[in-house]
Amino acid sequence: MFTLDDLLGQQRGGEALQQISQTVGADPGAVDTAIQAALPTILNQLANNASSPEGAESLNNALDRDHDGSLLDNIGSLGSLIFGNQAVSPQTDGGGILGHIFGSNQGAVAQQIGNHTGLDAGQVAQILMMLAPIVMGYLGRQKQEQNLDAGGLSSWLGGQQQRIQQSPQGGIVNAIFDRDHDGSSLDDIASMAMSYLTRGR
C-alpha cells in the first residue's frame, strides 16, 4: 500500500494524484514518485510511534476523535480543504498531523524525499501535508472495518512496516531516518521522540 491507488482505489487515487500535482505545481510523474517515497515513510513512523502501548493508545484515540475516514469521500476538494482560507479542522490539519508524527524533523524528511525525487523541498512539504490526512483517514476506516483497538492498530501497522522494509522503498525510508549516516536508523528514530500524542497535550 505504497501508492494512492492502494489506499483509495484506482479512480480516487488518480483523482488525488491530479489534485496534489495541481496544488504543488509539479509534473504528476514526479509527484507520484515522491508519494511512493512519502507514504511508506509516514506509515513506517506511525508504526514506530504505535509500537509502545502509550503510542498505540494515543493513535487509537486520535482516530476515534478526528479521523473516521469520511475525508476519503471528498478527495476532489482536498487541496482547498488543507490550503484554503477556511479554518483547518483536525481532520485536514496536515501540518499538525505531521508534527505529531515527525516532530521537528518534518523539514528534514521533506528535504530527503526531495533529494530522492528532484522536487523542491517546499513542494514535498506540501505533498506530505496532503498525504497525512489521507493516511489518517485510511487508518480510521481500517480501524472501523476491522474493528481494531489500540493493540490491533499496533499489530496492523507493524505488519505494514515489515512490508515496507522488504520492499524497494525500504532503503529509501531507512536513508531518510539515518540522518547521521551511521548505517542504522534506529538510534535516529529513537532520538526523534515522535509519538503521536493526543491533540492538546
Image (cartoon, rainbow, N blue to C red):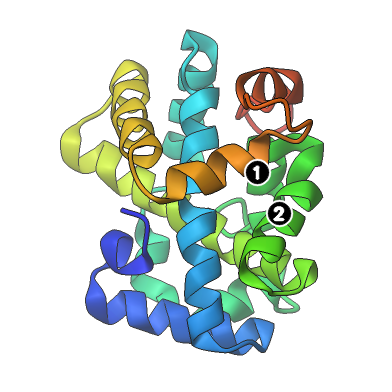
Q: Which labelled disc corresponds to residue 112?
A: 2
**Quarter of the image that includes the C terminus:** top right
Amino acid marked by disc 2: Gln
Q: Which mark is residue 176?
A: 1
Circle 2: element type: helix
Sort mark 2 into few (<14), some (14-19) or many (20+) by Cα contacts within 10 Å. many
Q: Does the residue at mark 2 contact the one at mark 1 (Cβ under 8 Å)? A: yes
Q: Identify whether 130 is placed above or below 153.
A: below
The relative height of residue 192 versus residue 103 in the rendered view (above or below) is above
The quadrant holding residue 157 is top left
User: In this rendering, would 191 be left or right of 163?
Assistant: right
In the shown orientation, is residue 1 left or right of residue 51? left
- x 64%, y 57%: residue: 94
The residue under label 1 is which amino acid type?
Answer: Ile
In depth, the one of 174 and 26 nearer the eye is: 174
**Residue 132 x, y percent position in the rendering:** 55, 54
Q: Nearer the viewer, residue 154 or 108?
A: 108
Residue placed furthest toward the top: 53
Residue sitting nearer the eye, 62 or 100: 100
View extreme (left): residue: 146
Element on which disc 1 rests: helix
The answer to whether residue 138 is seen in the rendering is: yes
Q: Earlier in the sequence, mark 2 or mark 1?
A: 2
Question: Quarter-wise, where is residue 152 in the image?
Answer: top left
How far apart marks 2 and 1 lie (CA) works out to 6 Å
Residue 159 spot, x, y in % from top left: 29, 30
For the question of whether residue 88 can be seen, the reply is: no
| Label tally | 2
